[in-house]
Image (tube, rainbow, N blue to C red):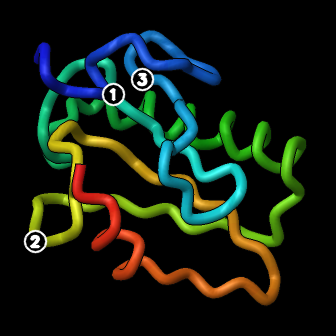
Amino acid sequence: MSDCIFCKNIPRIIENDLVYAAYDIHPLTKGHTLIIPKRHFEQIFDATPEESAAIKELLARMKAVVIKDHSPDGFNIMINCGAAAGQIVMHAHVHLIPRYKGEILRIREHLKGNTE
């Protein structure tokens, strides 16, 4: 789709045949990354089995990159499906959110401030 930010040529960190990883432009934490299917579809439920496997593979690869670059203490993996669930860009994607000891995530406040 021509108006979808994820369908445009945005900087990619790593990719495979079906999905790519990009840093979130409004990160919740250092290293907050998005895993984005190359095919445009709105919700993760519409991923093919091959796309689901490619997402899982890239999550593991990106986790290693984030560990090397940022040394987090843990991770959250988050998927928002639909506007009511906080999905802002209507192109399926998975958030890989590094977590650091003592840090508090304020997701609701974050979503309210990012209504792109």
Image: 51 above or below 83: above
Q: Quadrant of residue 18?
A: top left
**Residue 41 on image: x %, y %:** 13, 32
- Circle 3 crowding by C-alpha within 10 Å: few under 14, some 14–19, many from 20: many
Which residue is drawn at the image coordinates 26% and 19% (left, top)?
Answer: 7
CB under 8 Å between callouts 2 and 1? Answer: no
Q: Is residue 79 left or right of residue 56?
A: left
Mark whose residue sits in front, 2 or 1? 2
Kindly identify which residue carries mark 1: 37
**Residue 75 on image: x %, y %:** 65, 66
Q: Earlier in the sequence, mark 1 or mark 3?
A: 3
- Circle 1 crowding by C-alpha within 10 Å: few under 14, some 14–19, many from 20: many
Image: 89 above or below 83: above
**Residue 114 on image: x %, y %:** 32, 59
CB under 8 Å between callouts 1 and 3? Answer: yes
Which residue is drawn at the image coordinates 48% and 24% (left, top)?
Answer: 20
Q: Is residue 66 left or right of residue 80?
A: right
Image: 107 above or below 69: below
Q: Is residue 34 left or right of residue 48?
A: right
Tag on residue 84? 2
Kindly identify which residue carries mark 3: 19
Q: Earlier in the sequence, mark 2 or mark 1?
A: 1
